[in-house]
Image (cartoon, grey):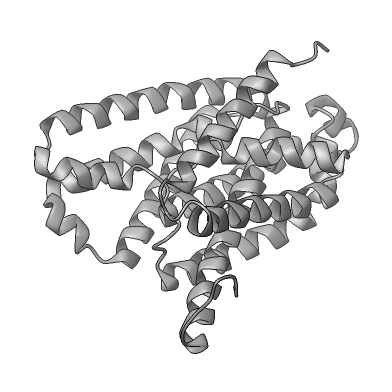
Amino acid sequence: MTLGARGNWDFVLPFRGMKLLALVTIATAVALSTMVFQTLTANRILTPSIMGFDALYLMLQTGLVFFLGGFGFATLDPTLKFILETALMLTAALLLFGAVLRNAADLSRMVLTGLILGVLFRSLTALINRLIDPSEFSVVQQASFARFNAVNADLTWIATGITLAVFLWLMRQHRALDVISLGREAAINLGVDHDRATKRLLVAVALLVSVSTALVGPIVFFGLLVSALTHRLIGTWRHAALLPASALTAATVLVASQTLFERALRLQTSVSVVIEALGGLVFLFLILHRRPR
């Protein structure tokens, strides 16, 4: 908030405060959605982006540029665009869960379906990119990466409210998450309505991913990086500790990365590219050093 600050404090503090709020909101949404999704799938190398949310977002951005043009896309009302993107991704997630997830035993089929849909969305995006005007392709490229420097203040408040509400609800479900992490049969034997709880938690995951992606763009490996760090630092399976710890870890990593990006690297690269690279390395490490059960 005060590092290297110069000029009018009445401008500096509100400006940096809003950016800090946006970073914390995005980090919390990504961390919570990843932790809950990994609990439901019983797999620590999966993230919600495996369901094709990022590919759907990119296809939507490319389609808007194709139909509206670069100028029309730039002048589109940010609030309307945010609501449209969030609603579309949430609807797609609910349709996927409703059509595929007839019961919790279909989780593997749901993940495979998400992978296939992600490939489909990326193929359609590549097709539209070939049809789009070359002069407007740079607009699509800019929208393809997460943007942390120019976040709309009004949208940040909306996203913060949604994320906070979901976080409080998930904290009330921490005991159910602890039991679900033991497996479907064990959860049912311990009195948890596993199928119903799983569907409700997946809706919460879809909402968090939709909000964070619509606010700044796709972040594929950030959740995986945060999850690995949280499990290594906390060393517990209790979600009462894992959920807030993951949010705090994600916020620390994202704010520190943004600070280094602005102060040390002088805006010479992209924070999202660095984070995705680190997350990709963590993903490879987890796969190559996975212990057999």
Q: Quadrant of residue 3?
A: bottom right
Asked if residue 5 is positioned above or below residue 222 in the image, the reply reads: below
Name the residue: 50% across, 89% down: 10
Residue situated in front as seen by the camera: 11 or 95: 11
Q: Quadrant of the N terminus?
A: bottom right
Q: Quadrant of residue 36?
A: top right
Q: In this image, 75 relative to 9: left or right?
A: left
Residue situated in front as seen by the camera: 125 or 116: 125
Residue situated in front as seen by the camera: 28 or 118: 28
Q: Is residue 132 visible?
A: yes
Point out residue 128 in the picture as x, y percentages from the top left corner: 18, 32
Q: In this image, 84 relative to 173: left or right?
A: left
Q: Is residue 196 visible?
A: no
Residue situated in front as seen by the camera: 253 or 99: 253
Q: In this image, 253 relative to 61: left or right?
A: right
Name the residue: 24% across, 43% down: 140
Q: How many marks?
A: 0
Name the residue: 18% across, 47% down: 65
Point out residue 287 in the picture as x, y percentages from the top left corner: 66, 17
Name the residue: 79% across, 57% down: 172
Point out residue 114 in the picture as x, y percentages from the top left corner: 48, 27
Asked if residue 230 is positioned above or below residue 27 in the image, the reply reads: above
Q: Quadrant of the C terminus?
A: top right
Q: In this image, 9 relative to 68: left or right?
A: right
Point out residue 4 in the picture as x, y percentages from the top left corner: 55, 71
